[in-house]
Amino acid sequence: MPVTDEINLPLIDPSIKGQILDTGVIGFSFAPQIIFGYGCLNRVGFLSLFLKAKNVFIVTDLEIEKLGFPSKIQKYLEISGVKSTIFNEIEPNPNEETIIKGAERFKSTNSDTVIAIGGGSVIDAAKIIRLIAKQGGKPSDYNATKSTIMAIHEMLPPQISIPTTSGTGSEVSIVAMISSEHEKITILGYPLISTIALVDPQLTMSCPQKLTAMCGMDALTHAIEAFISLRVNPVADMFSLQAIALIYQNLKKAYLNGQDAIPKINMSLAATIAGMAFNQKSVGLVHACSHQLSAQCNLPHGLANAIMLPHVLRANKKVAAPKYAIMATSFGFDPFSSDEAGASEKFISEIEKLNKDIGISARLSECGVKESDIAVMVPNAINDIAAITNPLQPVTKEMVESIYKAAF
Ligand SMILES: [Fe+2]
């Protein structure tokens, strides 16, 4: 292809082979600063001083507070001479009112920095609390799936994000999601990204077995959907492949023995680097479908992804099979032992086997989803921002309906 000074080519890969860059412009940004290590929570005081924090707003939920992590952070901050307030009111699928309350509290306590400690809901909620506290309005004003969105134009207060699960990758992403009346609000923008991601696998040692399984499958879905996304970014692809290998080797071990530190450390690393991959390339139809399952039927995000993943992969197979064969090598499969179609099917059935091994239900009907929910979810899934980068396009009503039915 001749290259001219006038570069006006699409940033998506029309061939879905995706391994060779056309001359489109891509961005590489793997911010924030990541501090990773078993026990590294004890750096939180030093890092707060580095951010010039004087008054920290600690965002968390009741479960995490019971584990004592927020009070531990307060002690580290105290040693560094930094004041703090705990806001423990984040619920599993946080709603607008909670965020607005958090933003008011952030301002009324004269806080200057946020520390989020918890799962993806807590970290996402904290990102939006900073936004509302600084720029005003309500979360739905910034919903990226609506055409009249308010842009994020302010520099937000610094945020240290500390995940207590290995899954969402929220600590390294520019995206935040909350719920509003059976609908998900998605907010995205570079100002939302954490200033520092403090990833301490020790905090995941107390993560319940079921949550380890669901979050691990969320991370695997991030890595896979980023890899087959229509966006081109070979650097992000390296992260995807490494995350897929780490999850395949460690998730079952982390599930079977929650006290074994090595699989937990590897899962922490995998979740963070899978987050770095999807932050560059976005996700796809698994997430577009699972967001509706959480909003409509209250399914945990990781569980919804785990159930939908094999079905969406089968639907996408006709365009993405070459990439499945590459990902199968991250599972350790010999690339020369079967053709592309065989490797693809083996890849998908191995994911189904992994789901089974870690106690994840195979069907939506086993998780309280009703057949009548499908009609409500289909249009929302088609309009979900994650559907834009799904490799198989266009995303039609028939396609989404048949995927939900296959998973039902
Ligand atoms: Fe996810």
Image (cartoon, rainbow, N blue to C red):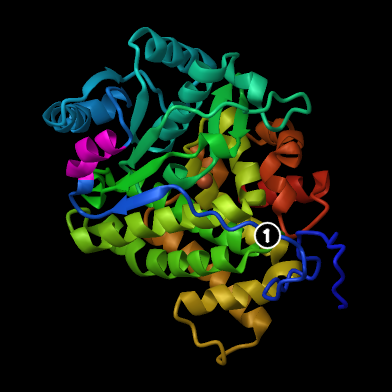
Residue positioned 54% across, 35% down in the render: 191
Is 234 placed above or below 287 here?
Answer: below
Judged from this view, the residue extending furthest toward the bottom is: 336
Q: Is residue 25 left or right of residue 39?
A: right
Residue 326: in sight, yes or no?
yes
Mark 1 CB within 8 Å of ligand 1: no
Q: Which residues are magenta?
A: 41-50
Q: In the rendering, at what x and y percent does residue 207 appear?
A: 26, 43
Q: Is residue 251 above or below residue 166?
A: below
Left or right: 398 in relation to 304: right
The kind of residue on which mark 1 rests is Ile
Q: Which residue is mark 1?
A: 26
Decide which of 130, 298 is in the foreground and name it: 130
| Residue 215 on the magenta span | no
Q: Nearer the viewer, residue 363 or 183?
A: 183
Give the dominant element type of the magenta stretch: helix, strand or loop: helix
